[in-house]
Image (spheres, rainbow, N blue to C red):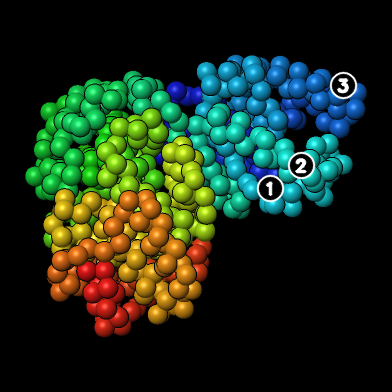
Amino acid sequence: MSSVTTACDRPLVLVGFMGAGKTTVGRLLAARLRTSFVDADDAICAQAAMDVPAIFAAEGETGFRERERVVIAGLLVDGPRVIALGGGALREPTMTLLAQGATVVWLDVDADTAWSRVSTDADHRPLARDERRFRALHAERAATYAAAADRYVDATAAPEAVAAAILGSPVVRPGASRDLRAFVGDRNAVTVVDEAVAHLVDQVGDVVLVHGGEEAKSVAGVERLWRALADARLERRDVVVAIGGGTITDVAGFAAASFRRGISWIAVPTTIVGQVDAAIGGKTGINVAAKNDVGAFHLPEAVVCDPDLLVTLPARERAAGLAEAVKTALLSGWSGLEAAEPLELVRRTSAYKVRVVTEDPTERGIRAFLNLGHTIGHGVEAAAGYGELLHGEAVAVGLVAALWLSERVRGLDPSVAVETEALLVRLGLPVRAPGVDVDQVLALIESDKKRVAGRTRFVLLDAVGAPVHGIEVDPALVRAAVERVA
């Protein structure tokens, strides 16, 4: 289920530059949602009885934009549920209308991809006849799309994959956590919230305060939540709202997955690690014999990421969350992490995870990529004692070990490890875990839930942006990797 079909019952509006595939994706998305679709440019042409080049020739861009404004206003009032807008449609007062009455999805493509898609169709695209102007316009409009968007999707993939990713993409918008009732609607709800952030966000229905941290992810912790859901008399149509870091969304999501054989839930992550990773993809669980070894795949119907909540994070928590973003940059090849503002960081990092999870929801294949650095990292985290090292700090150490193994097993360029270690240090993250018991880490790795046929498999890199999974590594090398970071 997706918040596309539940939150506010607003039309879904696709925006993005020329060549982003808005019309093709829009038709596929409308078919998935069993609703109607219209391309705003087609509606403009029908009203004018002229095609776009003819309108530009007769009335100029100013005339076209006025027609566009009128048509879009009409579509938002009484139109289809999926609407594709032209690349330059985001102007006032249209921007205000969209903010008040639509869920806006930015289909993002880089300038090279966009030009390759539209340059052969310049006769029908008046603004795609000059490549230099085209590229300048692409750069100019990016800030406008970013300001308008509720959701962000990487549109360089095939249209079917982009349409699927939209359904799983989080709402990432400043202030989004201040109107959670819009996502809950008229259903009954129980809000499970970390007591440390309870004063920062809306709470809907009955409220259960939880102290965040790995201790929340216990059998006793989930039992407490089950009893709270029962006391609130939640029915199958009702919803759990989970507000907090990754431990809160993990345990509350698992309670929702298992209560009455599964009820809906909404994740409101309040940490960087939650917004870029933990709350996305439907993994829920608790710790019994090992980290996350009891759980379920249970997709939230909405993930609501409010970057405004991140400004309250202590410096150590903020840095720990960035470890997952570094992991994603290694997997995807994104080079802009260090300079990114929180909004862009969350959008780009979560978009990669959504794309992978959409293709492989139950980790039968490429979803395993997301475990880069985690096999050794989880062992380090547990051996150090939960709370001694934050999850992201342990992942940072695990990444260093994974890159060292990648050099020796896959021939990864050694400069990747050097540059990544330097980046982790600049971000305030550890690259070693001094004093951790190597034998204990190795024993914990042996109990990792991702073992196959009794053997631990690793995610490694052939190059930045080229991960491989299911790699069996000589135990002596694994020991050497752990010793290097211990």
* Amino acid beneath label 1: Ala
- The reply to whether residue 16 is visible in this rendering is yes
Q: Residue at x 44, y 51 (%)?
A: 353
Q: Residue at x 58, y 18 (%)?
A: 96
Decide which of 419, 391 is in the foreground and name it.
419
Give the residue at mark 3.
Answer: 59
- The reply to whether residue 469 is visible in this rendering is no
- Do callouts 1 and 2 mark residues in contact (Cβ within 8 Å)? yes
Q: Earlier in the sequence, mark 2 or mark 3?
A: 3
Could you give the CA–CA distance between mark 2 and mark 3, rounded to whole angstroms?
21 Å
Q: Which image quadrant is residue 172 in?
A: top left
* Amino acid beneath label 2: Phe
Q: Position of residue 22 (x, y in %)?
A: 65, 39
Quick one: SS at disc 1? helix
Quadrant for the N terminus in the image: top left
Decide which of 307, 417 is in the foreground and name it.
417
* Amino acid beneath label 3: Glu
Q: Position of residue 458 (x, y in %)?
A: 34, 71
Q: Residue at x 37, y 22 (%)?
A: 179
Give the residue at mark 2.
Answer: 134
Quick one: SS at disc 2? helix
Q: Position of residue 173 (x, y in %)?
A: 45, 31
Decide which of 253, 117 is in the foreground and name it.
117
Q: Which image quadrant is residue 478 in?
A: bottom left
- Nearest to the eye among marks 3 and 1: give it: 1
Quick check: 131 above or below 230? below
- Do callouts 3 and 1 mark residues in contact (Cβ within 8 Å)? no
